[in-house]
């Protein structure tokens, strides 16, 4: 029995040793092979949101397994919900799209652009958080239903925005302008009392009237826009009084009125003008003609021209050479009285009796050098053949006294007694090449069979012309009058673009023309730039686009003409025509007519009786319409204003000039 025990003991030992070796080897017998963690993130598969994605954590911390922890998730049971970092109020709208991300009840920008709490469909203006809502303001005109005279018509409300005491409910036709309301006084060409019709009053109802200083001054014989001579953005006025005399008999004068100084006083004595330019020669008649010159020296200020056709400005021997004076805007300083003998430049006629300065004009920048150029007529030069003289702005140097023979170009009439240069004007750009063109009128006066004419010379022709240009041979177009002694060419004007085709148009007056309305009723021809073709010679009576016919015998319509600018704001240029002897019940006060570009239709013959506006003179034989001109825009309302001269108006024939504001 003891021997048996001894034999068993080593066997047990060996068995125990074998067991120890197995426990410490590589294949452990106690591993739980039922636990799976495929992404090795330490979270068992059954507790992991996605055991193939190490970035997704435990279900216990992200209930909907959307990657946002419960504390950061708006709804941890909804994988589609937003997160707090992007949707603070957890209303399902991200912060950039939420009107108020601290308020889950707020509107969203998609429905409420201005975030005023009213969705677009119910908001009058969803871009303005201050706007009214449709429920309170059905027509969305800014006036609540309870205060609105018609809450179904947005044009009617009780706001009175211009504070003039009238709202649109009170029939105020422009509630943004206090000078327009049912209680206002009409302008001559503007409806200010909202009755759809301007005043029918005469020039006594003009916005401003300027009175000559003394007996027989004839103020208003010439009128023109001066351009903007002081650089304030408002256009200024130029008025001539050729028979004004102070120390020199009939030396004449020109007056400058600055736009900025036009106030509430409507009747102004020219003695109180901003500047008075005094003629420097007895019986020189300075101010008989005048014009804005544009900017000839490139300083940003407009300059001006004054003609004195009978002056001997440079003390040459020989009478009546005539002169033209150029005054630069920068020379207008603190002194209000300026002697024309001290003008920046004085241009004198070549010979005695030339009548230089009988016409003057700024003609734009013909040579494209950035400086404007000027044109001066001397219609009696060389046996009354007549000449027009062109000076480029760049040619004006330090010498102030200039003989017209030194002009850059001289345009000579065809033959003796043509009186070329009686009128000169810019034509604008009639051919659309970007260069301004010029007009020169010639109206023969001595032979019964002679007919007046107007010459068009294109800027492109001038660019290649010699100094001396024959109007008969070298002009681009000759516009010929209809009758002997009709005085075609007495007046010419570029009128801008009347028909909106991009080409400027021209106006020609023939104030002695007989018509079916009587003798010397006068006519005015309008020729469109587009009508200028290959034929150089154009008969105005049959080829002009429109003919404007005076109303009665001896009206002399067309004695003065100009482009009115755009008086009604439609983008088309309008027309001015003067008739200094227009007869109103035997009184002959004279008149000026305004024809709107938009009113020109298919009828080519237009009676001035049917003009859009007729501006009647104040008194018998007042010669209203002897001068007409655009005034530019003197009040900065975007509309062109109008000047009309009546040189024999007044008890002492001192004369008047009238300013009519086109707008409000």
Image (cartoon, rainbow, N blue to C red):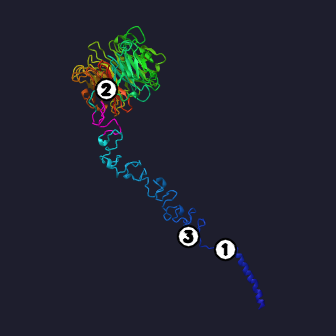
- The dominant secondary structure in magenta is loop
Q: Secondary structure at mark 1?
A: loop
The disc at residue 303 is: none
Within the image, what quadrant is residue 587 found in?
top left
Mark 1 neighbour density, 10 Å: few (under 14) some (14–19) many (20 or more): few
Q: CA distance from mark 1 to mark 3?
A: 24 Å
Q: CA distance from mark 2 to mark 1?
A: 116 Å
Reading the image, the residue beneath label 3 is 46
- Establish if 67 lies above or below 220: below
Within the image, what quadrant is residue 338 found in?
top left
Q: Quadrant of the N terminus?
A: bottom right
Residue 650 visible in the current orientation: yes
Residue placed furthest toward the top? 317
Q: For the residues labelled 2 and 3, say whether their Cβ atoms are less than 8 Å apart.
A: no
Reading the image, the residue beneath label 1 is 28
The residue under the point 31% across, 39% down is 173
Reading the image, the residue beneath label 2 is 576
Observer-nearest of 88 and 15: 88
Q: For the residues labelled 1 and 3, say whether their Cβ atoms are less than 8 Å apart.
A: no
Q: Tell me the magenta residue range.
A: 172-197
Is residue 567 found inside the magenta-colored segment of the image? no
């Amino acid at each position: 029995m003891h021997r048996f025990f001894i034999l068993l003991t080593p066997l047990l030992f060996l068995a125990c040793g074998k067991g120890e070796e197995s426990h410490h080897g590589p294949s452990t017998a106690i591993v739980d092979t039922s636990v799976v963690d495929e992404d090795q993130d330490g979270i068992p598969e059954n507790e992991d949101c996605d055991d193939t994605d190490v970035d997704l954590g435990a279900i216990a911390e992200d209930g909907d397994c959307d990657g946002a922890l419960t504390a950061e998730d708006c709804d941890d049971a909804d994988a589609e919900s937003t997160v707090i970092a992007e949707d603070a109020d957890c209303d399902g709208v991200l912060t950039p799209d939420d009107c108020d991300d601290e308020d889950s009840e707020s509107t969203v920008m998609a429905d409420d652009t201005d975030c005023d709490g009213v969705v677009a469909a119910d908001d009058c203006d969803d871009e303005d958080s201050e706007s009214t809502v449709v429920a309170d303001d059905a027509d969305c005109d800014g006036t609540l239903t309870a205060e609105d005279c018609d809450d179904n018509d947005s044009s009617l409300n009780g706001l009175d925005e211009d504070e003039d005491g009238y709202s649109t409910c009170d029939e105020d036709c422009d509630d943004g302008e206090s000078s327009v309301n049912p209680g206002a006084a009409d302008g001559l060409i503007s409806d200010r009392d909202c009755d759809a019709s301007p005043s029918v009053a005469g020039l006594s109802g003009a916005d401003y009237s300027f009175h000559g200083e003394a007996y027989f001054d004839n103020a208003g014989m010439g009128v023109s826009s001066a351009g903007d001579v002081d650089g304030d953005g408002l256009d200024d006025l130029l008025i001539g009084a050729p028979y004004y005399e102070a120390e020199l008999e009939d030396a004449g004068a020109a007056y400058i009125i600055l736009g900025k100084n036009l106030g509430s006083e409507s009747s102004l004595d020219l003695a109180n003008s901003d500047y008075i330019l005094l003629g420097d020669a007895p019986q020189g008649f300075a101010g008989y003609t005048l014009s804005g010159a544009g900017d000839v020296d490139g300083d940003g200020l407009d300059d001006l021209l004054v003609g004195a056709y009978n002056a001997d400005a440079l003390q040459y021997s020989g009478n009546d050479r005539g002169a033209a004076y150029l005054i630069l805007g920068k020379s207008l300083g603190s002194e209000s009285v300026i002697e024309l003998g001290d003008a920046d430049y004085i241009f004198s006629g070549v010979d005695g009796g030339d009548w230089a300065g009988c016409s003057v004009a700024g003609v734009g920048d013909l040579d494209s050098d950035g400086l404007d150029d000027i044109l001066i007529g001397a219609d009696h030069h060389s046996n009354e053949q007549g000449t027009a003289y062109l000076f480029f702005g760049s040619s004006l140097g330090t010498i102030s006294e200039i003989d017209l023979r030194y002009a850059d170009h001289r345009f000579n009439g065809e033959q003796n007694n043509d009186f070329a240069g009686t009128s000169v004007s810019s034509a604008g750009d009639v051919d659309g090449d970007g260069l301004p063109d010029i007009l020169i009128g010639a109206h023969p006066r001595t032979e019964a069979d002679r007919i007046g004419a107007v010459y068009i010379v294109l800027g492109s022709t001038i660019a290649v012309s010699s100094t001396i240009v024959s109007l008969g041979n070298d002009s681009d177009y000759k516009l010929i009058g209809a009758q002997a002694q009709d005085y075609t060419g007495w007046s010419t004007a570029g009128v801008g673009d009347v028909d909106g085709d991009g080409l400027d148009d021209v106006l020609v007056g023939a104030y002695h023309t007989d018509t079916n309305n009587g003798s010397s009723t006068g006519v005015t021809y309008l020729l469109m730039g587009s009508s200028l073709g290959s034929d150089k010679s154009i008969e105005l009576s049959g080829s002009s686009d429109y003919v404007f016919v005076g109303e009665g015998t001896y009206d002399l319509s067309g004695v003065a003409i100009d482009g009115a600018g755009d008086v009604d704001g439609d983008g088309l240029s309008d027309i001015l025509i003067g008739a200094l002897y227009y007869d109103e019940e035997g009184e002959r006060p004279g008149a000026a007519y305004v024809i709107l570009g938009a009113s020109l239709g298919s009828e080519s013959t237009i009676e001035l009786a049917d003009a859009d506006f007729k501006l009647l003179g104040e008194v018998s034989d007042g010669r209203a319409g002897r001068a007409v001109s655009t005034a530019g825009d003197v009040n900065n309302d975007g509309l062109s204003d109008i000047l009309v001269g009546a040189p024999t108006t007044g008890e002492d024939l001192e004369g008047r000039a009238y300013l009519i504001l086109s707008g409000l």
